[in-house]
């Protein structure tokens, strides 16, 4: 126990003060930068991510990544996707079905092939090429959802297609990552891979098709026993946490589970549950966005080779995703092709996680890790203005 | 980095799974036990604290205290007090002024003297006696606020008196603790003590008298620059975090700052800000209540001496507080005397913090620490039914 200071006692001491200080700086910094970004006609999302770069180790060093901050970030992303899920009905999502599947598949194939071939041409090892390919695959549905929501176009066909494709993309990305990881470990087990794929696909399909009905029945049954105030909201929270955990068990990201939980509840919950969930996402989402910016490390990409690679990889990541997804959305017409392509561009935290796993396996060098993190950040910063432009041309009926 | 498991990747890995599991168990466990408690006519607060004892190291050992859990608990208490503060106008609180000061002062003097004399009679050292006295002083305003809120009597005169007295009690408790700590360290500096007292009193008085007006002016000024959606709520959050931090700097608990922030904003914020803040407190308060239960360690009080001491100290803590505060509230009449006395009984997390500081100074033995923790828990568990009974006799106009 540290020496007693007259400051900060009668509470959990200095730790509490440090935590509050960090939270205040992150929250106020994010909102300030978000307002500034909007003031100059940019998306607030970009401002909040830039706040993370500014406050984090890369520039000012006021805020360091910590266990508590990443827990708040993780919760922020989950509440964001849950709240967005509440506004999407699974039938509306299923109506985009065939297009969304095409968008997701071409949006996985093209970036993967591009990343792999690019690294090969650059003279890196096959394993590194595989990992860069995998890191270029995964779309960060959180960023896109936040931007679509702030533009007020969540109910647009293109937006629904993007949300559905992003969920499928996550499942496909998981399978690609499992494949690449087992190749990197030199431990290729087709049966395990098939099981992983089966679990992830099975879980998602089951929730999309049967989630809503099951939740409604469960809710009706449980409500017989509930007397407490706000028990509707408590039940929704249990379902959110439970689905997040289940989806992690099935191998998919927790935020996908959160989105599916929201979607399954969308038909049945009251306005009150909406409002209460909004409070949590409004407070926590800045920690998610700032958290992404915190991971930027300019030192890792300071060599001329790395800088060149960052530029090429980032451009390739944007173009290959837009091309792949745009082709998948061909049937929606030119305006929506562009919207869907732009919506799938941000890699956000997902690309970073893939690179981290590659580092853990010793398959990815520090420099390539820095390249992937920068690529994830750049695609994430470029996507909001792209989306804004794509939806700005909108007429009343498109 | 741990070995790659097929489960839980594409997110922050096993840590994310562990965190989600813990949160699900804590939240669902708290709500389940809360419902059960209400089912048998008890307060949900007691059920949620018992859930913490049950899930924690004392019984099942499913949930261990952790940095993230205590951060969520701390935030839960802050949002609870903030939301309660939003419902209290500082003028209404000031009207209870003289009575509240009397309640707080007698509610500090009597328990302190009782604890000190009891330990002396029991043959413990003067330092231990001083610390037990200090631990018996501090009322946990969080528990009381939650119970008053769930009973729907926050606007009652007795409730307002309790809330005002609890804030003053926290400031007085801080001064007592500073005094006792410096005596235990054998390092008695009257000037430092006077400064601590001045800071704490000055901060609280300044916020109560000028907070509301200052916040309104600040808000009007800042709003000139804000364009974003929900910027009212964001501003309120910045004020909440900022006031929590300021109060820590002034030496008072962060939750007191949160309460004062809510109170200062109570005249000006919209319904929307209320609703969004309620979402945060609804989700986070169970972590605060369960967190209190997690600290129960039956092993430390398993000796016959310790058990006897727990029983005597707990009874003395309840009676001395009720007597002191009841005397202070003499002018309110018999029914409200009882209500005010009962409302000030719970020591909650504050008594535990005092004991921890005493441990850190080497002034409190393991056994006495266990006694203080048990006393805090017992007073906290006994208060909700007492309050319920006190308010049950209520007629329309009292």
Image (cartoon, coloured by chain):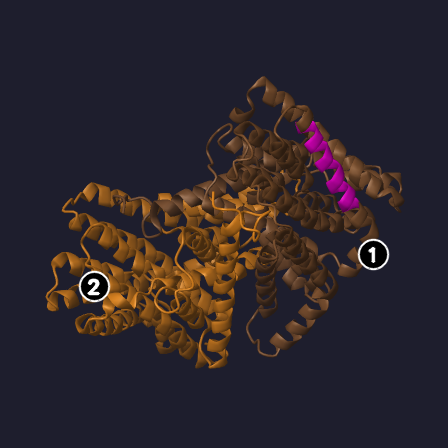
Chain colours: A brown, B orange
Between B203 and A116, the residue placed more toward the observer is A116
Q: SS of the residue at dot 2?
A: helix
Q: Residue B242: which numbered mark, if any?
A: none
Q: Mark 2 lies on which chain?
A: B
Residue B122 drawn at (x, y percent): 12, 68
Compared across the picture, whether B112 is left or right of B227 comes to left
Which residue is painted at 56% across and 24% down in the image?
Answer: A301
Between A98 and A146, the residue placed more toward the observer is A98
Residue A363 drawn at (x, y percent): 55, 35
* Residue with the mark numbered 2: B367
Give the magenta part as a residue range: A103-119
- Residue B294 vs B1, above or below: the answer is below
Which residue is painted at 55% across and 44% down in the image?
Answer: A287
* Residue with the mark numbered 1: A95
Placement of the C terminus of chain A among the 4 image quadrants: top right
- Residue B263 vs A310, above or below: the answer is below
Between A46 and B198, the residue placed more toward the observer is A46
Residue A41 seen in the figure = no
Which residue is painted at 29% across and 52% down in the image?
Answer: B174
Answer with the quarter of the image where residue A235 lies: bottom right
Which residue is painted at 24% across and 45% down in the image?
Answer: B194
Residue B367 drawn at (x, y percent): 21, 63
Compared across the picture, whether A260 is left or right of A26 comes to right
Which of the two discs, 1 and 2, sits closer to the camera?
1
- Residue A71 vs A136, above or below: the answer is below
Between A177 and B95, the residue placed more toward the observer is A177
Q: SS of the residue at dot 1?
A: helix
Q: CA gap, disc 1 to disc 2?
A: 66 Å
Q: Is residue B75 magenta?
A: no
The main secondary structure of the magenta stretch is helix
């Amino acid at each position: 126990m540290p020496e007693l200071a007259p400051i900060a006692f009668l509470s959990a001491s200095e730790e509490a003060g440090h935590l509050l200080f960090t939270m205040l700086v992150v929250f106020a910094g994010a909102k300030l930068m978000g307002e500034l970004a909007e003031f100059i006609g940019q998306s607030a999302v970009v401002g909040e991510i830039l706040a993370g770069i500014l406050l984090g180790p890369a520039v000012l060093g006021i805020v360091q990544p910590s266990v508590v901050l990443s827990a708040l970030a993780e919760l922020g992303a989950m509440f964001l996707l849950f709240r967005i899920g509440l506004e999407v009905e699974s039938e509306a999502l299923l109506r985009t079905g065939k297009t969304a599947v095409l968008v997701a598949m071409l949006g996985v194939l093209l970036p993967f092939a591009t990343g792999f071939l690019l690294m090969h041409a650059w003279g890196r090892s096959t394993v590194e090429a595989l990992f860069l390919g995998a890191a270029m695959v995964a779309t960060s549905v959180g960023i896109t959802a936040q931007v679509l929501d702030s533009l007020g176009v969540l109910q647009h066909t293109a937006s629904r297609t993007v949300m559905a494709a992003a969920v499928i993309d996550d499942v496909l990305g998981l399978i690609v990552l499992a494949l690449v990881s087992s190749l990197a470990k030199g431990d290729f087990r087709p049966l395990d891979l098939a099981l992983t794929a089966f679990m992830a696909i099975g879980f998602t399909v089951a929730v999309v098709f049967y989630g809503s009905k099951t939740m409604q029945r469960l809710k009706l049954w449980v409500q017989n026993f509930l007397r407490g105030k706000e028990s509707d909201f408590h039940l929704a929270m249990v379902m959110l946490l439970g689905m997040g955990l289940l989806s992690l068990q099935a191998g998919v990201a927790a935020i996908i589970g959160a989105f599916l939980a929201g979607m399954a509840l969308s038909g049945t919950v009251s306005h009150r549950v909406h409002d209460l969930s909004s409070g949590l996402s409004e407070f926590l989402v800045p920690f998610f966005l700032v958290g992404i910016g915190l991971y930027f490390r300019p030192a890792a990409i300071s060599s001329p080779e790395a800088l060149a690679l960052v530029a090429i990889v980032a451009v390739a990541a944007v173009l290959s995703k837009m091309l792949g997804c745009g082709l998948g959305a061909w049937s929606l017409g030119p305006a929506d092709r562009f919207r869907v392509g732009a919506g799938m561009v941000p890699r956000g935290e997902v690309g970073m996680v893939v690179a981290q796993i590659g580092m853990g396996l010793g398959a990815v060098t520090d420099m390539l890790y820095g390249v992937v993190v920068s690529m994830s950040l750049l695609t994430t910063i470029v996507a909001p203005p792209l989306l804004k432009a794509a939806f700005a041309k909108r007429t009343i009926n498109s």
